[in-house]
Image (cartoon, coloured by chain):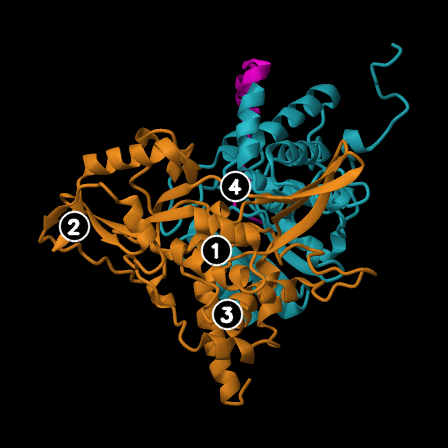
Chain colours: A orange, B cyan
Amino acid sequence: MTKILGKKELESWLSSIMKDRTLVAPKHVDDLTLFSPVQSVEEIAFNYENTNLSPKELFFPRTDTLFTVERKDSEMEITPAVIEQETVIFGIRPCDAWGIATLDGPYLDDPADSLWAQHRAKTTMIGLACTKPAPQCFCTSMGSAPNDSSNVDILLTEVDEGYAVETVTAKGERLLQGVELKESDVKPSVPSCDTDVPAEGIVEATQKVFDDPYWSRLADRCIHCNICAYVCPTCYCFDVRDRTDRGKIERIRTWESCQSKGFTRIAGGYDPRADKGTRLRQRFCHKLLYFPQQFGPLGCVGCGRCVTACPVNIDIREIISDLQELGAKVGQGSN
Amino acid sequence: MGADFTQQIRDKAKELLEKGTVECVIGYETGSDGVSARPAFIHDPAEVDRLVFDNTCSHNLVKYLLNKKGKPTAVVVKGCDSRAVNLLLSEKQIERNQAFIIGVVCPSVVEWGWNKRSEQIQKRCDWCRQHTPVVYDFLVGEPVTEEPPPDFADVAEMEAKTTEERAAFWREQAERCLRCYACRQACPGCYCIDCFVEELDPEWVGIRIAPQENLMWNTIRAFHLGGRCISCNECERVCPVNIPLSLLNRKLEQEVLSLFDYRAGMSDDTIAPLITFRKDDKLGIGE
């Protein structure tokens, strides 16, 4: 039997969540769809392919204070940042939830990042399965699925009578306490994601192509902005700086990207990735080679955001295919 | 237009590469969605058939000439893009004899559409009165007679708002800004080796990706383009959060036009009024 939550019941459930927690949901802002805190159900966008920006910023904000330092009676007092607010995310897609889980690798590995760990503990994710994957999506090629419930607390799938409910974790169960679910024999349909990206064996292929001139040719086209990294659910680099304001010091971190000039510049001025080709290679090698070597999964979940947001069409799906082809040639000794 | 323009560009590219006039032809090819064009770099005459031209050819390819210094390079330019060639020539950033300009009489370009061709003409094309390139070595298409330029209705609409409304509008835009710097990276007029926004000493703009700092970034960048912006509007096209940067750029364009009767990039031997000084400049001081 499938458990069903009616559309009206979903709305009153979300309204009750808003009373004592921050509810973050997709919202249409001008012609974009963005995850935003919402105060009423009317603000929520229920029909959307995916948000323009990934929900990683709910765990890894674009700018975050790590701690503040203040002088108190001639003593210095250090106050680390504490996340107190309980947050519920409604409408996170399975690919994005997987992106968050992927980042647990670097962020919860010992020593765990305190802010990431706190955000994870205080956040409950209500996933919404994709019923119509977008043409740029390729989650199935990367090992997930439009209705993958592995990384959310609750997964909802739209059906005629409302939403089919799959309670995944204890946290999800707590959030659903007191919510009446109907029983039905309806089976939610499983949408297919047609794009086929040859990701199998990509780690080995990428390693073989490391020194290929492919990267500098591709970098001819790249304009080296940070769009791909900033819309990506699994790009997680940052810069850290101290900010002073009338005796108060804040240590802040902000998003940064390996595509920035000077990202790897070190004291004395040397930059091991000064040219565009090595910077572009870094992004793809990190996702397809270093990340899996270090943490297991690939550093790409197939959300397709970078594919459509890149101003010059640097397309990771095409790059994966190219690397497989070039890697195979290296194997044959004909490169 | 399409097929014929494409063929003329391919033929010229082939000739230039075969003769060794240039090392590379920068043009457009069909992107990975099979619909929209993307920049293409052709080094081998056998590959010229990758080149295409249609109304999805939006990118201003002149920016790429800055990466080709000292290497003879051909570049496909539309009318607005060609003004960037003059801008970079007048500011001594590129050398005329190193650049072969394949000018295309612009059919107006459409909004970017993923997987589906958009029918919507870009708004920059509504303002544009430079469909025929101002500089070229080879021209594709017949020069057209240009209409008189339209007024700055979009700027006037913004200026009709109260100060508070305008502040609220820009604050909302700045809240969205990611500081990804795509606007700068796409802009042919942004070529500083060290951009002010990344300088640490002094730190002109804080690194927080937050409304106050973001406004500072967008405003200073707009001022650096004052009288230099050639209206290709690439900054706005590439912005991942759709900030209407043209409102800032066009306000400055309007000011420079009314004060100095100057439009950026119309010739290769004039320097933008705000980056030069003349003794007879009317400064409005002590007069």
**Mark pair 3, 2: CA separation:** 35 Å
Q: Amino acid at mark 1?
A: Thr
Say which mark, if any, is on residue B6: 1
Residue pictured at 40% horizontal, 54% vertical: A96
Say which mark, if any, is on residue B261: none
Q: Nearer the viewer, mark 1 or mark 4?
A: 4
**Mark pair 2, 4: CA separation:** 45 Å
Asked if residue B54 can be seen in this view, the reply is: no
Classify mark 3: helix, strand or loop: helix
> Do pointers 3 and 1 mark residues of a single chain?
no
Position of residue B170 relative to residue A251, above or below, is: above
Q: Residue furthest top?
A: B287
**Mark pair 2, 1: CA separation:** 57 Å
- Locate residue A225 relative to residue B108 in the image: left or right: right
Which of the marked residues, 1 or 4, is nearer the chain's N terminus?
1
Say which mark, if any, is on residue B237: 4
Q: List x then y, in percent, for residue A318.
A: 45, 65
Q: Which residues are magenta?
A: B139-165
Q: List x then y, in percent, for residue A196.
A: 34, 67
The residue to which callout 2 is attached is: A3
Query: Quadrant of residue A219 in the image?
Result: bottom right
Nearest the viewer among B61 and B6 is B61
Query: Alpha-carbon neighbours of circle 1 within 10 Å: few (<14), some, or many (≥20)?
Result: some
**Mark pair 1, 4: CA separation:** 24 Å
Classify mark 4: helix, strand or loop: helix
Query: Quadrant of residue A236 in the image?
Result: bottom right
Nearest the viewer among A121 and B198 is A121
The residue to which callout 3 is attached is: A295
Q: List x then y, in percent, for residue B150.
A: 55, 23
Q: List x then y, in percent, for residue B33.
A: 40, 57
Residue pictured at 34% horizontal, 64% vertical: A144
Q: Residue furthest left?
A: A185
